[in-house]
Image (tube, rainbow, N blue to C red):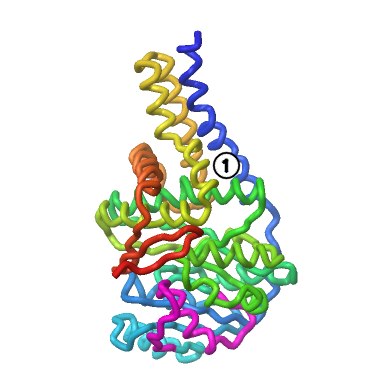
Amino acid sequence: MLRQILPFLIILPPLAYGLISLFCGRTFFRRRKPASGHTPPVTILKPVKGMDAGSFENFASFCRQDYPEFQIVFAVASADDPAVPVIERLRNEFPDREIELVLDGRLHGPNYKVCNLINAYPAAKHDIIIVCDSDIRVGKDYLREVCAPFADPAVGLVTSLYRSPGVRGSATAVEAMGFTCEMIPNVMVALRLEGLSFALGASMAVRRGALERIGGFPALVDYLADDYQLGNKVFRAGYRIELSDCFVESVMHRESLATVLSRQLRWARTMRASRPAGYFASGITQPFPAALLALLLSGFSVAGVAAALLLYGVRSLTALIYSRSFVKDGLFPRWLWLLPVRDALSFATWGLAFLGNRVRWRGHLFRLLPGGRIEEVA
């Protein structure tokens, strides 16, 4: 009897977690949204290094905002950066927009992205500061959506979910599936159970007062996960963090699987260093090892196969609903066959995160220190 029941007990944690994430996602995406009538002046800070896929269109999407007053400040470390001509073209094609380019290579710590933000911050004119990655593209109502929650003075930061529609090849599909099948469901559960105490780096809008209260961007320069740290510090300073369901889009190059896995491992080790207990506990929600263990311990019996099929039936349904109804990224059902592969690679990176403390980021090698701080390895 135990041999028949054991496979189903093994799959119970990830099975239950998948169903809980589905409930949490449904609750969030069907909630009543705040009115978008609050439109304070905004400064968008964009740290840039090198070219991304569709850089000009990514930048131009911010210039096409339906919003009364905003400023865009590009932060670049070197005049030789290939993104500089693209920014100059942007200024020529959108002469009615307030676009500034700050060229400043001063270093203040090991996180070069945050160094760019520190250097550009004096050019920011407005009290709502938005930090958005250079590979992000947005819709024309983006500013209206993310600024609406600031009508409540208790809100210190608004962060946005992100997706990657229109992926190019199976390797980038594997990475994009991580947003839809892991990151967003995990955020939904965290939001429902404990509220949001962190930010997502693709898009972070923060009050100047909240930013300065935590020590400004210099407080983040020693960390790799500057997005997590910004949100967590603002939360611990007594402000509320709001999650906008106005999706921003992460535009990807066609990349090799090795490149994608290297980036996934960097993210995994960063989260392991930032939230060690939570990261370790997340292992029980992983579906791939549960399905594999159910099969192995049952000797590939009918019960073991049935348990694995049940788990992946629910897993596939959850992924399909998230993709089609919540995220609307067009990934599924086309790439659904890759879901077990994505889960296997996710489990592998989860485990490898415990076996080292080095990460490679933008061509530089760093050592992760306790608490999420980093130092560059010569």
* Residue 315 shown in magenta: no
Q: Residue furthest top?
A: 1
In this rendering, does residue 102 appear at all? yes
Locate residue 63, reporting x and y percent.
48, 80
Quick check: 190 above or below 336? below
Identify which amino acid the numbered label 1 is placed on: Ser
- Image-based side of 21 in relation to 47, left or right: right
Q: How many marks?
A: 1
For residue 53, say whether it is visible. Answer: no
Left or right: 183 in relation to 167: right
Q: Secondary structure at mark 1?
A: helix
Residue 369: x and y, percent? 44, 60
Q: Which residue: 60% across, 46% down?
A: 189
**Residue where numbered disc 1 is placed:** 21
Q: Quadrant of residue 84?
A: bottom left
Q: From what the image shows, is residue 291 above or below residue 133?
A: above
User: Viewer-proximal residue, 131 or 316?
Assistant: 131
- Is residue 322 found left or right of 36 in the rendered image? left
- Which residues make up the magenta segment? 101-130
**Quarter-of-image position of residue 60:** bottom left
Indicate whether 55 appears above or below 261. Answer: below
How far from the left and from the top, in percent, is residue 54? 34, 71
Closer to the camera in the image, 364 or 130:
364
